[in-house]
Amino acid sequence: MIGISKLYCGTVEPSDALRYGRLSSSLPSHLLQFSSDKRPVVVWNITRQCNLRCVHCYAHAKDQTFENELSFEEGKALIDDLAGFGVPVLLFSGGEPMVRKDLPDLAAYAVEKGMRAVISTNGTLITAKMARTLKEIGLSYVGISLDGMETINDRFRGVAGAFNKAMKGIRNCQDADIKVGLRFTINKANVQEIPPIFDLLEEMDIPRICFYHLVYAGRGSTMVEEDLSHAETRAAVDLIMDRTKDLHDRGKPKEVLTVDNHADGPYLYMRMLKEDPERAKKVLDLLKMNEGNNSGRGIGCVSWDGSVHPDQFWRHHSFGNIKDRPFSEIWTDLSEPLMGKLKDKKKHVTGRCATCGWLNICAGNFRVRAEAV
């Protein structure tokens, strides 16, 4: 993640992370990316079932039940292990996590064990009652996916009415006083929706948004031609920075991040060098703390069947299964060739990345996209 608001608008200083010792166990959530120990944020895809048919779904989710999902008791055992291992955040995802009836119980158990529990959802199933339940169990955050305004979003989501149901879910979270934000996957067909999405943030007083670069995984692997060109990507990132700064300057700051393309970090830094060289020095320090892509180190994934992956998109490689060995043991087993390399990835990248001057900042970027290309 590249914190556009943190870096470009100066809402975070290097001293903020240093004050907490840069340890995951002590850092507040908005500073976790600057930790030194990189305890993994774990994405648990608790189900493959989903009520929508998103064209870019990395999980190939379908509106049907699957027999190979971890049971409630297996989920509790996973949470016990993750808590003991010092995982700071457990992100419940899918498919659509809200289709699992035991989601509130699993999230409550994670909170009870001392982790921050967050949910990544399409928002369409968050009723007012469910929002109150999520608030009562101590859920930290709900991220709701929108890929544009109504027409574009529903086209991507494959179900008419998905936008309006998601909007209702957002309002239900707000009414229950749960922090709620947006997730937006950028591509050629919806890049023009970025301005109205910023308008929506302001109109609905939504505090956070993550702009995801398209990842060629799952159904998204068929969308390589829909990804932005380099020039279009730069223009989109510039637009995101401009709109973030505008809100900040007008006293309506939002937390804005870009995800899955760590080249955004050097790009932002080079822009800052032209605009504010003194701030640029602090940006560079923060980018060094961030360390770029952390698949297999600062982020990991447990699939619905218990398989452990470097991240939620790198599904074609599994390090093992938590039914056979605890996550903590799998994650620290450096005899697994890929796991060993990912723990110090910069030594093992090849090609242009190996000689790039920004290697220490982006760490070879997002490898699933590179592999797919």
Image (cartoon, rainbow, N blue to C red):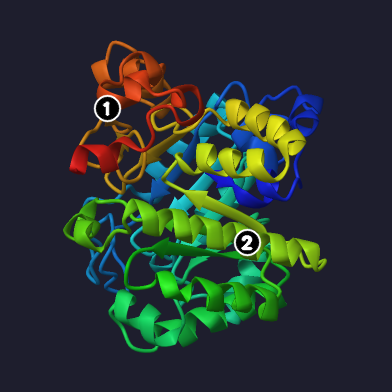
Write down the quadrant of residue 52 in the picture: bottom left
Write down the quadrant of residue 335 in the picture: top left
Of callouts 1 and 2, the N-terminal one = 2
User: Which mark is on residue 373?
Assistant: none
Determine whether, in the image, residue 255 is placed left or right of residue 93. Answer: right
Which of 296/318 is in front?
296
Amino acid type of disc 2?
Asp
Q: Residue at x 65, y 42 (%)?
A: 274
Instruction: Provide residue 75's location: percent of width, then percent of height.
Output: 42, 44
Q: Residue at x 71, y 74 (%)?
A: 205
In the rendered image, which residue does mark 1 sit on? 319
Instruction: Provide residue 364's location: percent of width, then percent of height.
Output: 37, 29
Is there any visible trace of residue 29 in the rendered image?
no
Q: Nearer the viewer, mark 1 or mark 2?
A: 2
Check disc 1 and report its element: helix, strand or loop.
loop
In the rendered image, which residue does mark 2 sit on? 242
Write down the quadrant of residue 128 in the picture: bottom right
Amino acid type of disc 1?
Phe
C-alpha separation, residue under disc 1 versus residue under disc 2:
41 Å
Determine whether, in the image, residue 218 is placed left or right of residue 347. Answer: left
Mark 2 crowdedness (10 Å alpha carbons): few <14, some 14-19, many ≥20: some
Q: Is residue 45 above or below residue 199?
A: above
Instruction: Provide residue 14's location: percent of width, then percent of height.
Output: 74, 30
Mark 1 crowdedness (10 Å alpha carbons): few <14, some 14-19, many ≥20: some
Check disc 2 and report its element: helix, strand or loop.
helix
Q: Residue at x 44, y 24 (%)?
A: 359
Which of 162/203 is in front?
203
Q: Residue at x 46, y 75 (%)?
A: 193
